[in-house]
Amino acid sequence: MQCTEQKIAVVTGGGSGIGFAIAEKFVANNIKTVIIGRSSQKLDEAKQKLGDLCQTVAFDLTNLPAIPALVEELAVQHSNIDINK
């Protein structure tokens, strides 16, 4: 019996537009997808559409000094990030 781990993807701008479309494809392929964006409202709306395989992170990626802490937090939560877009 082969054991497969849950694949994890991280998509910036996943609350709308191209980022949402990418996240939608990952979720459709049974990939747990973390979407990052500035608007909690857009992220919440996207999660409602994407379902349980979606996790949201409200974060402004223009805050460059805070990005290392975000990456560390994601690494702690998800030991294996397979895809980042």
Image (cartoon, rainbow, N blue to C red):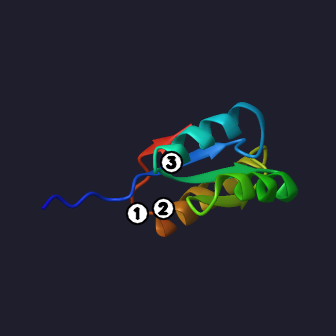
Q: Which residue is at the far top?
A: 18
Q: In which quarter of the image is the C terminus?
A: top right
Residue 45, located in which quarter of the rendered image? bottom right
Q: Does the CB distance between marks 1 and 2 fall below 8 Å?
A: yes
Q: What element carries label 2?
A: helix
Q: What element carries label 3?
A: strand
| Precedes in sequence: disc 3 or disc 1 | 3
Q: Work out whether residue 55 or residue 2 is closer to the camera in this orientation and state it.
A: 2
Mark 1, residue position: 79
Eye-nearest disc, 3 or 1: 3
Mark 3, residue position: 9
Label 3, residues with CA under 10 Å away: few <14, some 14-19, many ≥20: many
21 relative position to 8: left or right: right
Q: How many labels does the image show?
A: 3
Could you tell me how far apart the alpha carbons at marks 1 and 2 are, in whole angstroms?
5 Å
Amino acid, disc 1:
Ser
Q: Work out whether residue 38 or residue 63 is closer to the camera in this orientation and state it.
A: 38
Amino acid, disc 3:
Ala
Tell me what residue is drawn at x 72 percent, y 47 percent. 64
Amino acid, disc 2:
Ala
Label 2, residues with CA under 10 Å away: few <14, some 14-19, many ≥20: few
Could you tell me how far apart the alpha carbons at marks 3 and 1 are, in whole angstroms?
12 Å
Mark 2, residue position: 75
| Precedes in sequence: disc 3 or disc 2 | 3
Residue 35 image position (x, y, % from top left): 65, 51
Could you tell me how far apart the alpha carbons at marks 3 and 2 are, in whole angstroms?
12 Å
Residue 74 image position (x, y, % from top left): 54, 61
Residue 81 image position (x, y, % from top left): 44, 52
Q: Residue 16 carries which label?
A: none
Q: Does the CB distance between marks 3 and 2 fall below 8 Å?
A: no
Q: Quadrant of the N terminus?
A: bottom left
